[in-house]
Amino acid sequence: MVALDRAWRSLVTVLDVRAGLAQEDQRTLVAAADAVSDFCTTHKGVLEDHIGQHARDIVKDWGGQRCTALFGVGEVRDSARGTPYARVLAALSPDGMLKAFAALWRFDRRAGALCPGRSLEVIGRQARHETLASLELCPEAYDALHALAGLAPLPDILPPDVTTLKPHDIDSLFEIYTAMPIADLENRLRGHGFQRQRLLGDGESLGRAVLRDAQWLARRHISRHAVSAALAARFDRPSSESSGGTLMVSPTHVRDPFHTIDVYPVHGRGTADMRVGWLPRKQVPSLAIETIRRACFFASGISRADPAFLVKWLGLK
């Protein structure tokens, strides 16, 4: 279809200029935005389907700038309203964009890291619930989009009593949830890829680390959910003092290691700088509230926030 080809080329033109991959004059950009807007008005959902079918063209450019530009809905400032770029994004339907994102994600999971979480939150809240329910995604991606859309909280990854499991059982549950080999997940936790924060030490097993901390808590009759709830309560009082020490929060954006999609808008409260007496300061992201509750994962390696430290600091014993 000639009209579809023109709309597609026009979309790419606007995205490439926005991403800094090309230069065009304003007249050309306005004409491109008109072509996209007119086509989307007449043929609802067709261009979005075409995006999914041509995932390679969107995800595989240079550093993924085109993909980031395509899902820049949440990044459009008031001052940019009415620009060709904003008009193009407004012409694309939320439901169609969610389906397109799912197709891009299945082609290359890097799409989850390239698309701003705030933008996916905006799109998810505007889309129909039936569209979200119909997406063919693995558990971590499905849950991430539902949480961003405000439909459901992020669920637990592991059962309440982890101590009944063996390390390889825990690893298997993580593999099922993330749909990736445990070696790849552990590599991500060691700070490789988009997850730059080092949460697991070299040679350290995720399953063994989780079981070790779960057993430590069990011996003291403390649940991981109690630790998570107490930590969340302290984040709600960022500059206050407690009997255990002080907490100051800085607005640091930390990615959830168990999701390929950025779910920071769901749990983002920054990073806390904690101190207990004369002990060295600890930096703990608010993300720990989620990873402790959902997976009994306290984070190891260089930036370890171990159970003993948090339990003492939170006054749980």
Image (spheres, helix red, strand yellow):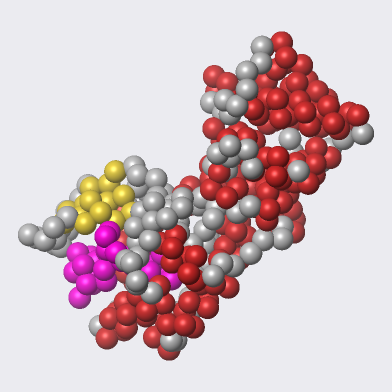
Q: Is residue 225 visible?
A: no
Q: Residue at x 54, y 19 (%)?
A: 79
Q: Which residue range is magenta in the image? A: 288-317
Query: In this view of the protein, can residue 25 be seen by the observer?
Result: yes
Is residue 120 shown above or below 186? above
Q: Which residue reaches farthest right?
A: 1
Q: Quadrant of residue 3?
A: top right
- Residue 12 vs residue 192: left or right? right
In magenta stretch: residue 70: no
Q: Quadrant of the C terminus?
A: bottom left
Residue 142 x, y percent position in the rendering: 62, 60
Quadrant, the N terminus? top right
Instruction: Work out which residue is located at the far left of the displayed protein and give it.
Output: 278
Residue 189, image x and y in percent?
A: 41, 62
Residue 42 on image: x %, y %: 88, 31
Q: Residue at x 68, y 56 (%)?
A: 106
Asked if residue 306 is among those painted magenta in the image, a careful observer would answer yes
> Which residue is found at the position 53% from the left and 48% from the top?
113
Task: Characterize the magenta stretch by its predominant secondary structure.
Answer: helix
Q: How many numbered marks are there?
A: 0
Q: Position of residue 192 (x, y in %)?
A: 42, 55
192 displayed left or right of 216: right
- The quadrant where residue 219 appears: bottom left
Q: Nearer the viewer, residue 41 or 237?
A: 41
Q: Relative to residue 13, is residue 168 depicted above or below?
A: below
Q: Quadrant of residue 232?
A: bottom left
